[in-house]
Amino acid sequence: MIYVALLVLMFCLLIGVPVPVSFMASAAWLIFFGGPDGTGYDPSQLLPYGFAQMNSVSLIAIAMFIMAGGIMERGRIGEKLIDLVDVFVGHLKGGLGVVGTVSCAVFGSISGAACATLSCIGSIMFPRFEAGGYPRGHAAALMSNASLLGLLIPPNATLIIFAWISGQSILACFLATVVPGILATALICLVNLYLLKDNPSVLVSERRSAPERLRMLKSRGRGALPALMLPVIVLGGVYGGIMTTTEASAVAVLYSIPVALWVYRGTDWRGLAAVVVESAVTTGVIMAMLYSVSMLSRLYVLEDLPSKMLYLFQSISSNRWVIMAMINVFLVIMGMLMDDISVVVLTTPIMMPIITQLGFSPIHYAAVVGVNTALGCITPPAAPVLYLGGRLAKAPINEMMGPALKFMLLCWVPILLFTAYVPKLVLFLPHVILGVPW
């Protein structure tokens, strides 16, 4: 019956049923027809389990980071960051793309969300790209890929949920994606420069003299300093042992309010109230999804799905690195069908027993999950971030797919292979800072 339940889930997702409802449909099948004797499971045992899973202080951090990101998105922080980065690379051919990519990486360390990063940085950068002669499809694909850096550079709501489900340290999971995030930033910048090096329509700004650049750096640096201090305060407090992740998320909200209201003056109290409402709606959707999928994951475990999947993998190969490749393919396929949070919540209870039995570090697997879920956000048919980038840039999907595919193959596939098969470099920061074993 477990295989029928999986087919029910996949069928519902493919025909466009909302993800939480798809989860509940698969769970309902197992409730009525699951179990060793096919008589199903008692719902009175599953409903309290779902509520017990939701009773976690760590989940408060998700709501707080969503709110902090929304406040800073409205607070004109993106414009200040872009102006600062432009001082260093704005004179290069294709340098405007580097400005957008690095700005996404910095803003991602504040918002922790790809769509918020794309909405904020993209809305500022797309008019500049158009004025600079950038092809619309390239600009949309570039910013869609660069916005995924918000899913790798902490804080990150996806990894908070992963740590909550798997029982791992949130700090260690955050650190596991830092090296892949930095490498992804560099690769996206380099691929952007390579793709545009022979494009005659791309304009190049005048090279500034050293004194002029220094003067601009001082003035723009002062303007961007309040925004840049947020990740320093949050991550410094967390890794310094001053605050827990949940406390740091609350501090992020308290810090972002005066910065958005009175320093950058990008919003007012009415706009702040709108952010609170939007954050509450987003958090409510996530919590409903977590509740439904926590029960479904419990049913999958009761049906011994992890052992069945491990047996399937081992029937193909007994080499654990080959099995790691199959796990990556499985995560990519799941990412093509649903959003990043749904992938994490659904697959983590299934995959964690397999990962530990194969001898992989759970923190290493956290980095693998982070990169795979990021890739899934731009991989059709779901690809919510890719489609959002097309709408913001007003670029037809046929103009976007060519550049987007190049960025995926030249940037994300190497990062995925690096994350999966070079665990010591991935675990370098968690090992050095927190003592996580190799």
Image (cartoon, rainbow, N blue to C red):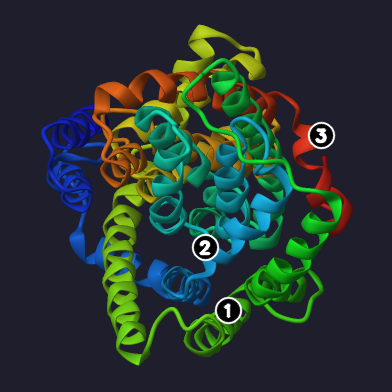
Pick the front one: 234 or 204: 204
Numbered badge on residue 78? 2
Residue 384: percent from left, percent from top: 31, 42
Q: Quadrant of residue 340?
A: top left
Q: Are marks 3 and 2 in contact (CB under 8 Å)?
A: no
Q: Which residue is mark 3?
A: 424
Side of 116 where 183 appears, left or right: right
Quarter of image, res 184: top right
Residue at left 30%, top 38%? 390
User: Any mark on residue 69, and which?
Assistant: none
Q: Secondary structure at mark 3?
A: helix
User: Real-space Cα distance between discs 3 and 1?
Assistant: 31 Å
Camera-near label (2 vs 1) is 2
Q: Earlier in the sequence, mark 2 or mark 1?
A: 2
User: Residue 420's spot in the image, x, y percent?
Assistant: 65, 27
Place of residue 155 in the rendered image (x, y in percent of width and height, measured from the top left): 59, 61
From the viewer's perspective, is the residue at label 3 or at label 2 nearer? 2
- The vertical placement of 8 against 50, above or below, is above
Query: 25 or 185: nearer the eye?
Result: 185
What's the CA distance linking mark 2 and mark 1? 17 Å
Task: Report, in whole angstroms, how far the alpha carbon at label 3 lies from the one at label 2.
Answer: 34 Å
Quadrant where the image shows the N terminus: top left
The answer to which of 374 and 427 lies nearer the viewer is: 374
Identity of the residue drawn at 49% across and 54% down: 158
Q: Which residue is mark 1?
A: 252
* Disc 2: CA contacts within 10 A as few (<14), some (14-19) or many (>=20): many
The amino acid type found where label 1 is placed reads: Ala
Position of 405 relative to 135 (above/below): above
Hey, what amino acid is under mark 3? Lys
